[in-house]
Image (spheres, rainbow, N blue to C red):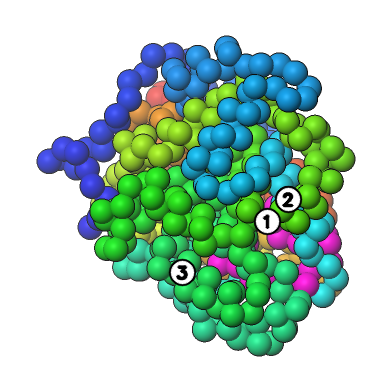
Amino acid sequence: MSEVKFFSGENIPLEMHKVRIIQKLNLVPIERRLEAMTEAGNNTFLLKNRDVFLDMLTDSGVNAMSDKQLAAMMEADDSYAGSETFTKLENKMIEIFGKKYFLPAHQGRAAENIISQIFVKPGSVVPMNYHFTTTKAHIVINGGSIEEIPIDEAFQINSKDLFKGNMDIDKLNAVIEKYGAENVPFVRLEAGTNLIGGQPFSLKNMQEVREVCAKHGILILLDASLLSDNLYFIKTREEQCKEMSIREITSALSDLSDIIYFSARKLGSARGGAICTNDEKIYLKIREFLPLYEGFLTYGGMSVREMEAMTVGLEETMDENMINQGPQFIAFMTEELLKKGVPVVTPPGGLGCHLNALEFVDHIPQNQYPAGALASALFIVSGVRGMERGTLSEQRDENGKETFSNMELLRLAMPRRVFTLSQVKYAVDRIGWLYENRKLIGGLKFIEEPKILRFFFGRLGTVSDWQTQLVNKFREDFGDSL
Ligand code: F0G
């Protein structure tokens, strides 16, 4: 069913790299995993890595680095101002994105902070294909609000639409009409739309968004954090782009954007962030904020070693054989789970494989956080750490009422070049077992609930003793095994 191209006739995703450094993993017994989950308040963010077997929490800052990245780190030029390392990164940014100005930031949300402070005022409305948690928080904290206007298919868990991250052009026109172009500081397009399952937008869609924005004099802000997956999907799924190189597609997307920012924890497989633009006025405004929040203009809160790695990582992103591993492994995992009847988001996206908790545990009401409960249960039975992307990741409204998420997903991220196929098969096997025993999974309730971005530090308890029953059933079926 997948349009993703595999190299082998047996549909085996084939890595175009070999592993030369390894890190030992622990698989602790299920009883310890239950204890660890309880200590972590059923929040996978609060687990200690020593208790985790496969860390599928995120792809952020945990992608495997290449030999060339590691080698480049040794050549870093360490100086507060004017380091050669900065010039190398700046040149690479200009080469790839074709924008005149580059500003470093210590990570993606740092760029969001500065951009929001500059452009968002009380009453501002920012239309976007979908929000990301930190993006929304920065816009709201500056008095603005967001309008999510993806195409309707975005919320269909299973769809044939290959670009569920597309923006709905009619809705965009309607939002601008409703609030007035003067209240829309920019339209934000997120590549590889994170919270709806790593779904891409098409080049054609961005061209249409551009037409509307140009008519009204509105800026386009591209969040390129998940660009590498989106590039791969444009290349493999969009008819008009089949003959274009990844570099040409990048350049086409960049030409349609006024400001690009990204988390280099994802794009570039390093740890950092970046902003670029062609507009001198915008550049100068952003530059004023850099020393306040990030550091000097020539490092922006990043270590010079990471900047060297980022320069090489960005270049590697332009190589189809480097960026295909993630999407191909995700497609493999998605298809294996479908064979077992497990509800997953389709078509497979980038970033990770996404389980649909609303169907997986359809007996758990949304106010008991089905995706959070599934994350907790999966860790207990497998040591696989995923991330809740549902109601827990939302915030209560001003009256303290839950804002139910459009989707309740358990994201199983596939950090690039990190896991082997047998590890993916192990995860599939345990998820299959959990699916057969899904009725044993129960809900969660808050014990400690922070006001802002509660999913990071919130602690939850179970609504019944379902976890003990789950462990007992596991022992019945698996005997002494881990
Ligand atoms: N935009 C998108 C689309 C992201 O996915 C992220 C981070 C950010 C911005 C913020 O970047 O973490 O460098 O500050 N996503 C991570 C994740 C946290 O796990 O999906 P950051």
Mark 1, secondary structure of its residue: loop
Tag 2–tag 3 contact (CB < 8 Å):
no
Q: Is residue 219 magenta?
A: no
Amino acid type, mark 3? Gln
Toward the viewer: 70 or 37? 70
Amino acid type, mark 2? Tyr
Q: In the image, which residues are magenta?
A: 124-144
Position in image of residue 302 (x %, y %): 70, 29
Badge 3: residue crowd in 10 Å (few <14, some 14–19, many ≥20): some
Judge from the rendering whether residue 343 lies leftward or rightward of residue 466; answer left or right. left
For label 2, the residue is 283
Amino acid type, mark 1? Asp
Residue visible at 52% across and 72% down in the picture: 209
Residue 180, image quadrant: bottom right
Position in image of residue 255 (x %, y %): 51, 58
For label 3, the residue is 207
41 over 162 or under it: above or below? above
Taking the view exactly as shown, the residue that stands out farthest to the left is 9
Residue 35, image quadrant: top right
* Disc nearer the start of the sequence (1/3): 3
For label 1, the residue is 279
Toward the viewer: 335 or 99? 99
Judge from the rendering whether residue 44 lies leftward or rightward of residue 293; answer left or right. left
- Can residue 150 be seen here? The reply is no
